Amino acid sequence: MTTTAAALFDVDGTLLDTTYFHALAWWEALWQYDRTLPVARVHRAIGMGSDQLLDHLLGTERDHGDDEGITAAHAALYARFWPHIQPLPGAADLLRACADRGWAVVLASSASERELAVLRRALDADEAITAVTSADDVEATKPAPDLVRAALDRAGAEPEHAVFIGDTVWDVTAAGRARVPCVAVESGGFDTRELLGAGAAEVHRDTAELLADLDRSLLGRPPA
């Protein structure tokens, strides 16, 4: 029986330089609805889907009546940045290198399907990608494990034959809850201490450094 080995990649902040675009868009969306928060606090919540982010920032006991409007405002504000989205250093080459080594490469993003299509065009590495999942495929986004499990299902892989690659403590937590080891990068603004503290197996500065260190990484060779 052939075992599928899957490399499950977060997208925002891991492969594409979008973290601070999201932070600014969420900050302004909240401000439009009279919820003024320090942008640094908003940044620390990036990596969660909107279902989790608003609870994290505003509390679960709040009036939820504005949630849909805030989320829609974020989507519109974030879309202004689409023409400026760029891959992080080495991102596309890392996906290709993983595919060449026998990994099934799956994008596991908290973005909507519409946003994910924009991100894939900017990344320009579709030939290396086996499958994708988005927030539209699950009921709860990161740090819940649902997206990681959906990505495993798309790849047809078991947790012990997979590695998750992400940039936030929310990614690391979601992977851990799905029993998948996590390789982390610092390009989303979380540092090595935080990522290791959340349970990351290893941490690299960005995808370029991970690519350079690939032979020494969990991604060096798919598990048998």
Image: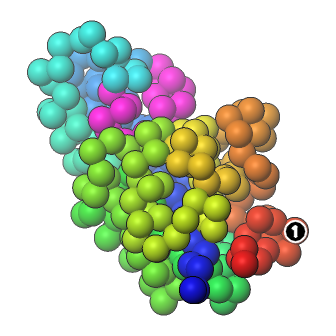
The residue furthest front is 1
Q: Which residues are magenta?
A: 38-54
Judging from the image, the colouring scheme is rainbow
Measured as percent of width and height from the top left, residue 194 is found at 72, 33
Relative placement, left or right, of 33 versus 106 is: left
Residue at the spot x=44%, y=39% of the render?
Answer: 144
Relative placement, left or right, of 216 versus 199 is: right
Badge 1, how many Cα within 10 Å: few under 14, some, many 20+? few
Q: Report which quarter residue 214 is drawn in.
A: bottom right
The residue furthest right is 216
Relative placement, left or right, of 208 versus 12 is: right
The C terminus lies in which quarter of the figure? bottom right
Measured as percent of width and height from the top left, residue 197 is found at 74, 33
Measured as percent of width and height from the top left, residue 52 is found at 36, 32
Looking at the rendered structure, the number of numbered marks drawn on it comes to: 1
Residue, disc 1? 216
Say what amino acid the circle numbered 1 marks.
Arg
The N terminus lies in which quarter of the figure? bottom right
Residue 194 in the image: above or below residue 105: above
Measured as percent of width and height from the top left, residue 103 is found at 62, 79
Relative placement, left or right, of 13 versus 80 is: right
